[in-house]
Image: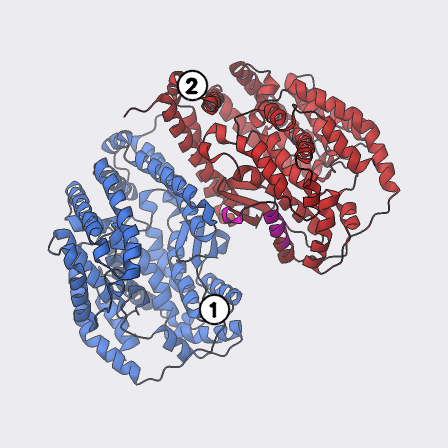
Chain colours: A blue, B red
Amino acid sequence: MTITAYERLTQSFSRIACLNEAAAMLSWDASAMMPPGGAEARGEQLATLAGLAHEFLASPELGEDLAAAQPQGDWEDTNLALMRDAHIRATALPRDLIEASVRAGRTCESLWREARKTSDFKAVEAALAEVVALTRETATILGTALGQRPYDALMSQYQRGITSEQAAGIFARYEAFLKTALPRAEALQATRPAEHLPEGPYPEAQQAALARALAQSAGLDFTAARLDISAHPFCGGTQTDIRITTRYDEQDPCAALMGVLHETGHALYEQNLPARFRRQPVGEAAGMAMHESQSLIIEMQAARSDAYLSHLAPLFGQAFAKPVTSAALKSRLRRVARSFIRVEADELTYPAHVLLRFRLEQALLSGDLTVPDLPGAWNEGFQALLGITPPTHAQGCLQDIHWFDGAIGYFPSYTLGAMAAAQLMAAARRALPTLDAHLAQGDISPLSGWLRAHVHSLGSSLGFNEILANATGEPLNPAYFEAHLTARYLT
Amino acid sequence: MTITAYERLTQSFSRIACLNEAAAMLSWDASAMMPPGGAEARGEQLATLAGLAHEFLASPELGEDLAAAQPQGDWEDTNLALMRDAHIRATALPRDLIEASVRAGRTCESLWREARKTSDFKAVEAALAEVVALTRETATILGTALGQRPYDALMSQYQRGITSEQAAGIFARYEAFLKTALPRAEALQATRPAEHLPEGPYPEAQQAALARALAQSAGLDFTAARLDISAHPFCGGTQTDIRITTRYDEQDPCAALMGVLHETGHALYEQNLPARFRRQPVGEAAGMAMHESQSLIIEMQAARSDAYLSHLAPLFGQAFAKPVTSAALKSRLRRVARSFIRVEADELTYPAHVLLRFRLEQALLSGDLTVPDLPGAWNEGFQALLGITPPTHAQGCLQDIHWFDGAIGYFPSYTLGAMAAAQLMAAARRALPTLDAHLAQGDISPLSGWLRAHVHSLGSSLGFNEILANATGEPLNPAYFEAHLTARYLT
């Protein structure tokens, strides 16, 4: 019995996926379980797995199969196209450039760790310039190979199916919205006295039990998932063995509860990907922005809704034996405040942080902005968007690791995801008239079921805008996000 | 700069070792952490890793490097010899035979699970005959390739450096010893009233805390190790990231405490292997019997000694807030009793279980014993050795999984390890006159230090008998084990 080129490809990608699954598990372990002594060996294990996955993906035999493979049907055609994309990305870059980029990223990252402590941009300037130069070279080569603009070639590593041009229009519209929305939201907030949550401690074990119950009622299947602790919360593992993590602050239970619901959104996406295309590119999630839309629709759209918080308040009171009102939960979970730090930003101003990075990283890549001018451009941009200027570079352009280890094109996904979440929620509310009544019972499952049908089960068979168009009737439209923010913060 | 064939080999083996380390971690996870939903995917991940490791080990390029490599010094010569052995084992067997063996083992194992429940040997007889026939073929081919007798080719998979001929003599001597020792030990025991431990429960958390403290005081470095729970306790992970597991019975804390000390012995061996030869065959532990000697010297020789138990009794009392005497610990931990079940056997009679298997599996392999005759031969042999006959086959030849999934040549290591432990302990006592005084303070570290110098740090640079000869002045000599049993059970 002969095997076709396409079948051989599915076997190759399945093997690559198994290596990546092993790596995902070992990465989870490194964050959640591993004793410190294991770090060096773990690095070698992960490098071996990544090296082999790359070797298989870049192999000439795989290239020959790609050239010979015949179309097999809708999903299979898309699968083949995604395989080609992955092979091009794995082979387009000269080895020298890859190695130089890894070295430069490592050097820059370690200088950045020191530079951030002392808020000394100069200490990392030359290293960052090197990273940017190498990233520019990478983007140019990938762009040529993929027929995309250089920045788009980077952006599409994280999220296919949306261009920087489309994103630029969306961000410009948000900027205009924010200009009037932010002062109005602040003024409105000032007229409403904040209610405080009862004093802690909120014991870790009780937080964990409640977080687990909430995740479960959102549809997470714990016979195929775990919840553990790590310094930086994430959703890892594999489709049938999800590992979500959180961290507990005994003074503030809300961070862990909302964090777990956020990761639950990611987890539901992974658990409900199409099993028939397990370990195939077309069976994977449709990208980082779409993934973020799934975490944010659970956390921001569903769990922070009036309906859900009215249910959460008494549960919360029971779990910790402290009375709490839903007004206090709202004060805590829906407070607007201009912040220098992205990861502390609220829902309304968060996209401003992303917008600034989106513009600056494009300017760095094109050469319109030089690295020495970055801190000034950051501070000016921040002032223009949010009306405040970071007092130090540590609170400014040094705050995040990503640029310093070479990740450019990564940030837009956060905000594109937030906007997609609002658009999907609006469509789900139209399709499910009782959605809010269910949320008021703490029941997220009708929403999860709708997402499974309209997003999760599609895998990567459609692109970002196509999935939205299918599910909601139109490609990404920022009006839904504005309407959501208006309803929550301006009325 | 050119790279020599030997250097290329060390790189190849390092990569193979990284794959094996990844697999070891994933296996630990499967036993200690994984939700049930992950089982199928984990199977695929482990099969992929094992398949790649085998592919690299069997590759013609590696064979060419082995042919071309030049001697480089003592350890390197041994490393090369061990590499050759591994390559021969990976290439000697035809693919058909490997696949047939895997299939037959899987079928037989699943029939065995049912057969054991109903004690129905007939239900698994044909499948076991198939396993034995394929194992015979495997042993013959490996024996020819390695210049060993067929059974020795299987035995040396688990423990190199000791032949079945040497083992047969050692077992025969033990048999003679047991004949008079067992009734004498029982008679002596009968004259001494048993003291009982206080009634439970012994809470799991307190057992875990004490077990951890004991492991630490034996020298286990928890910055490079974890202790968790699994159904079947084991020591897994890698040299710098050891994962030991246990299970807790709230009615009987001794099982977990001694179990953890047993795994600690394995862990110390791994943690103290020569770092300079990390991921090379010569840097690995010297085999399963040597490994078992390291767990048993901690558990049986050190921790069950009069000295250590005199220290443990008050600790035990503190940990559980229940007064306990060292006499009660001795009654619990050093009781002799004829048992049908190997894993429940005491130190004195355990080797009889192994001896029986050692003889029967050789007879099966040679064809002197047919599979249908196995249950009868088991029962006769058991009666001859221990004077009791299993009432059912589930308590007889069906009790262990190993034969039924094709593991032959595996059992002798347990008893060779127990004997080596006694011999090493005798040498350590000669070298360290204060050893028992330290044990009476709960301090196992002088023993651990001696083992590190004389066993652990040697890796596989010497064989089983050579390590013993170096450390104790002579190759394996069962007289030390007899002396130990005599001192503990006959006086």
The chain letter under disc 1 is A
Q: How many marks are shown on the rendered structure?
A: 2
Q: Determine the image quadrant of residue B172.
A: top right
> Which mark is in front, 1 or 2?
2
Does the rendering let one see residue A240?
no
Residue visible at 45% across and 75% down in the picture:
A313
The amino acid marked with disc number 1 is Glu
Q: Is residue B199 above or below residue B156?
A: below
The amino acid marked with disc number 2 is Pro
Mark 2 — residue? B71
Residue visible at 30% across and 81% down in the picture:
A189
Q: Is B222 colored magenta in this rendering? A: yes
* Of A215 and A77, the residue lying toward us: A215
The chain letter under disc 2 is B
Does the rendering let one see residue B282?
yes
Left or right of A413 in this view: A39: right
Q: Position of residue B148 (x, y in %)?
A: 57, 16
Mark 1 — residue? A250
* Tag 1 near tag 2, CB within 8 Å: no
SS at mark 2? loop
Question: Is disc 2 on the same chain as disc 1?
Answer: no
